[in-house]
Amino acid sequence: MAALDFSGWTADAIRAGLAGKDFTATEVAQAALDRVQQVDPQINAFLQTTPEAALAAARAVDDAISGGTFDQLGPLAGVPVAFKDNMNMLGTRTTCASRMLENYESAFTATCVQNILNAGGLPLGKLNMDEFAFGSSTETSAFCTTKNPWDVERVPGGSSGGSAAAVAAGLATVTLGSDTGGSIRQPASFCGVVGVKPTYGLVSRYGVVAFGSSLDQVGPFALTVRDAALAMNALVGRDPLDCTSQECSTDFTANLEEGVEGMRIGVVPEFMEMQGLEPEMRAAVEQAVQKLAEQGAEIVEVELPNAAAAMSAYYVIGPCEAFSNLSRFDSVRYGYCDPGHADLGSQYEASRAKGFGPEARRRIMLGSYLLSAGVFETYYYQAQKVRTLITDDYRMAFGDCDCILMPASPRTAFKFGEISDPTTMYLSDIFTISINIAGNGGMSMPLGLGADSGLPVSAQLVCPWFKDQNMFRVAAALERVYGEAPVAPAFAQGKAGE
Ligand code: GLN
């Protein structure tokens, strides 16, 4: 008999199979772990695996089934899941893909991770990322480069590159990433999967290593809109341990079937003319707009006049917050400690110089400069004013529409080493950053393959604050047109040298 293979299976399909006793959760966990072991060396999405935790979670699901309490199991019962390595989970290291935290053992479990486990997820392990989430290609990881399952010579995007690649290669059904300026949506676009950055405040960040605390948000990756919605149902809600988190009782699966008839969808003509937007990406977004119009959506043009300044504001606010957050890695309480220093000053200096990679050091130095006396009025205050203007732009735009459709990424996945200049790399997030600045929800939706490159293309959906169900509704309508996102062909069942 062929080995069991659950790659590409949705949460609902797994649930139905468990309910029908076609297989057990333990079989799902074992098959998923075997597949990671066999297939992951081709893409390096995982930094560590957690077979014991996966099998223990599976046993709990199987016990519930044999105990007759199947219907009490959460929405992700028996579903293989994995987490970006900036999320603490007891029994794992949380490295942030940095030498600084190479040996850091999680002291507790992040609320987002716990919520996914409580929903019945089977944790397969921790996923590669750009160091401390600084980057757009996962190339700044101190440990390995993750490959894009659609073309292993290309990057998976970043910083949540491992999270996107694991789903695209059929290694996990749901993964979590974090998004400060685009780190869920851009890799989702590069890897052809659904990636959601919820409205700021929907998901607790407790236990997630902080980058930019006023921008960071955790969200799911999945092949299907419904799986992402099920993960959202598990993730959201007030957590007393994160004062920014809000009460939420939305069921994100509730209106997936409603269609877009009567919805007002905003488009931003100026964005479509943006320099650097690849023609095939532009064509894909324009076609999506047309498909939605054909289904009865009303298309309205909206303006975001200050969005062009978002990049500048982000590269002030982001580094300032990162500088403050990363000061805790001082080699005493946390982080790599360079041995043999007689005085604390030289220990700090050597440990931080050796523990952090070049991009992390660049951000820290930039933040330190921008917050220094005599300078911060010019940059930090100015950036905060720009932030208010951009936030108001979105508020105004959402007076006229229920959801905005725009590109997620200006281009398809690039090759390793193709972008070496930091400023060009920063432009990867040109369409995503303003949404973190304003705090709205954003979602990258796969739209098949580009006509020129043959690589995944996408569109981004953006919603008013705490109306994330709007973008799920539009995404589901697009999924009905374009079909559910597949596992990358080279990794489809029976391929990838299994
Ligand atoms: N690529 C952006 C940066 O380098 C965004 C990263 C993120 O969202 N974590 O800052």
Image (cartoon, rainbow, N blue to C red):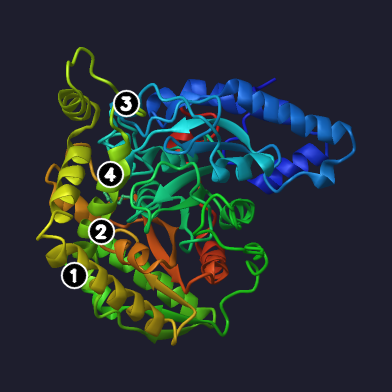
**Looking at the image, is mark 2 or mark 4 nearer the viewer?**
2
User: CA gap, disc 1 to disc 4?
Assistant: 23 Å
Which residue is labeled 4 in the image?
134
Assess whether mark 2 and mark 1 are in contact (beta carbons under 8 angstroms).
no
Q: Residue at 33% across / 44% down in the picture?
A: 159
Which residue is labeled 3 in the image?
332
Q: Earlier in the sequence, mark 1 or mark 2?
A: 2
User: CA gap, disc 2 to disc 4?
Assistant: 14 Å
* Residue 231 x, y percent position in the rendering: 60, 51
Assess whether mark 1 and mark 3 are in contact (beta carbons under 8 angstroms).
no
Instruction: Determine whether 347 is above or below 132 in the image.
Output: above
The yes-or-no answer for disc 4 within 8 Å of ligand 1 is yes
Amino acid type of disc 2? Ile
Instruction: Determine whether 370 is above or below 327 in the image.
Output: below
Q: Residues within 10 Å of mark 3 (few under 14, many from 20)?
A: few
Which residue is labeled 1 in the image?
382
User: CA gap, disc 3 to disc 4?
Assistant: 23 Å
* Residue 310 x, y percent position in the rendering: 24, 67
Amino acid type of disc 4? Phe
Q: Earlier in the sequence, mark 3 or mark 4?
A: 4
Q: Earlier in the sequence, mark 3 or mark 1?
A: 3
